[in-house]
Image (spheres, coloured by chain):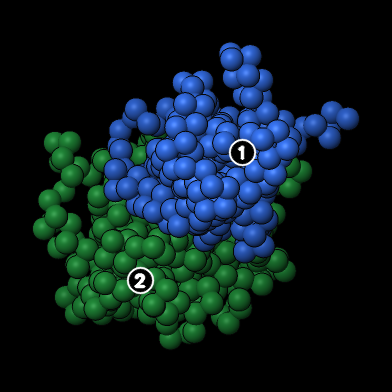
Amino acid sequence: MLDFLKGPVETFQEFLFLSGRAIRNIVRSPHYAEDILLQMDAIGVGSLFIVSLIGFFSGVVMALQMSRALATYGAEGQIGQIVSITLVRELGPVLASLLVAGRNASGIASELGSMRVTEQIDAMRALGTDPVQKLVTPRLIAMAVVLPLLTIIADFLGLIGGWFIAYGMLNITTSQYWSTAWRALEYNDLTQGLLKPFLFAIVIALVGCYYGINTTGGTQGVGRSTTKAVVVASVWIFIITSLLDPLFVNLG
Amino acid sequence: MTSAQSLPAQLPVAVAFDHVNLAFGDTPALVDLSFSMRAGETRVVLGAAGSGKTMLLKTAVGLIKPDSGHISLFGEEVTGRKENQLYELRSKVGILFQEGGLFDSQTIAENVAYPLLNQFALHKNGQALPPEEVDQRVRESLSFVELEHTLDKFPSELSGGMRRRAGIARAIVTAPQLVLYDSPTAGLDPITANLIINLIIKGRDISNTATVMVTHRYQDGHLMANFRYNPSSGKIERAESSQSTTRFFVMQEGRLFFEGSEAELRASTDSYVQKFARPGSS
């Protein structure tokens, strides 16, 4: 039993060490501003289209599906409230983060994994650079900045998607839709809507970097690391949101 | 039969291993490894795949930490140092990795400039080297390996031999006191392999650097031991055998199985050593 647990515990311990070093490096020199901007571009601008698309269609689907349930109680006018609360609290952060995990945790793991198996990371250390400072910390900072921004965009486009259905199919006026959507939101909703993607971003970046930087076994190993990074990051997104939700629900 | 016995005592020790052990799980990588070499000397490390040759190079600069024993570079302890305390020591060492280790997202010029820009021990008064000086040294180093025309190319655009030469340019651009070469001729045709060894000999003799070369090919070691760069003629010429400061190591399962001169290597009757002591062996 102990031997069975040894591997996962060691992995988690190494992950925490890497996380600690990456976070500590945020306030340590040297800072690689150019790498941070490059990563922001790769993660943020690169994911903008797909996150916008999914955000918009999740709003459309949400409005369509909920309209039938609300029609039973004659409460179709509250469609804006349902769409905004669901998107801002849960669906926006989780969907945007899952997309970014699939797109960028895999990208980070495969890039760093390839560097590892071709001795580029050893070369970096030999040539006077801390790979955590040069590779992990810029990705962590970039992800923590852009994922909340992507989530805001996904939320907003989701609300537009909901309005599209409300106005076009449910005959709800624009002002009614937006006023119910806006008034439904409280500080609690906005806080969790932004805190979640921030925490997911940290997990996605660090999991991607951890599996990439610890890749062994040549090109096959790069494939394994990439798969593991996406699976583990996605699972952690659901674990974190499940842990945070009761906290915010109790806060009212 | 230690290398230091036959060499001038006044030269400082470049590398010293003292009873170094390293294992990955139950698999030993280095076993009770002890040797030292002085500035200006050459070590040619032969041995079967997995015998610990690459581990020897990586532990020498602290890329991998040994389980026990002591390693020092230029009289300073490597073992026990934290990673960020090793960078200054590493700035005195150039390394050519087995696959070149070039950064594939950077141009050749950026690759060669990397150690100049990132090794803080090379900075003057805390300031990075001026771009003109970096550019000049990059061009000089690439010119040395006859690759001055590849400045703006990416590693993937070069042949295997050219990538290896670019790796040499990066390894020597900081004028290190010790250069470690990991299988510099592996997978190359004989003409390119000889060109690479000639460049290594030239680099070694111009700057009188300590050199450790891991290789599968006996011919590489033979050239290193018997040829020198003549600065007046600009050619690689046969050296007098008495001048040779090259010694051979043969590694087996992490152990230093044999250490001696080329003549001693050739005279060995051990069947494992003989595998690496015949011209044409690989």
Q: Are marks 2 and 1 on the same chain?
A: no
Specify the subunit that label 1 lies on.
A
User: Which of B141/A105 is in front?
Assistant: A105
Q: Is residue B21 or residue B168 the one in the foreground?
A: B168
Mark 1 residue element: helix
Residue A215, x across and y down, in percent = 61, 51
Q: In which quarter of the image is the C terminus of chain A?
A: top right
Residue occupying image coordinates x 39% and y 77% = B157
Q: Which of B230 and B175 is in front in this view?
A: B175
Q: What element carries label 2?
A: loop
**Which residue in the structure is indicated by mark 1?**
A76
Disc 1 residue crowd, few under 14, some 14–19, many 20+, Cα 10 Å: many
Residue drawn at the location 70% of the way across and 44% of the way down: A68
Q: Which of A68 and B3 is in front in this view?
A: A68
Q: Which chain carries label 2?
A: B
Disc 2/disc 1 C-alpha distance (Å): 60 Å
Q: State left or right for residue A151 relative to residue B237.
A: right
Where does the image place residue B127, in percent across and percent down from the top left? 15, 40
User: According to the rendering, which colour does chain A have?
Assistant: blue
**Label number found at residue B154:** 2
Instruction: Identify residue type, mark 1.
Output: Glu
Indicate the colour of chain B: green
The quarter holding residue B206 reads bottom left
Please provide percent x and percent y for residue B132.
11, 58
Tag 2: amino acid: Phe
* Residue A216 visible somewhere in the drawing: no
Residue at 29% x, 48% y: name it: A34
- Quadrant position of the N terminus of chain A in the picture: top right
Tell me the crowding category of disc 2: few under 14, some 14 to 19, or many 20 or more residues within 10 angstroms, Cα based: some
Residue at the outermost right position: A1
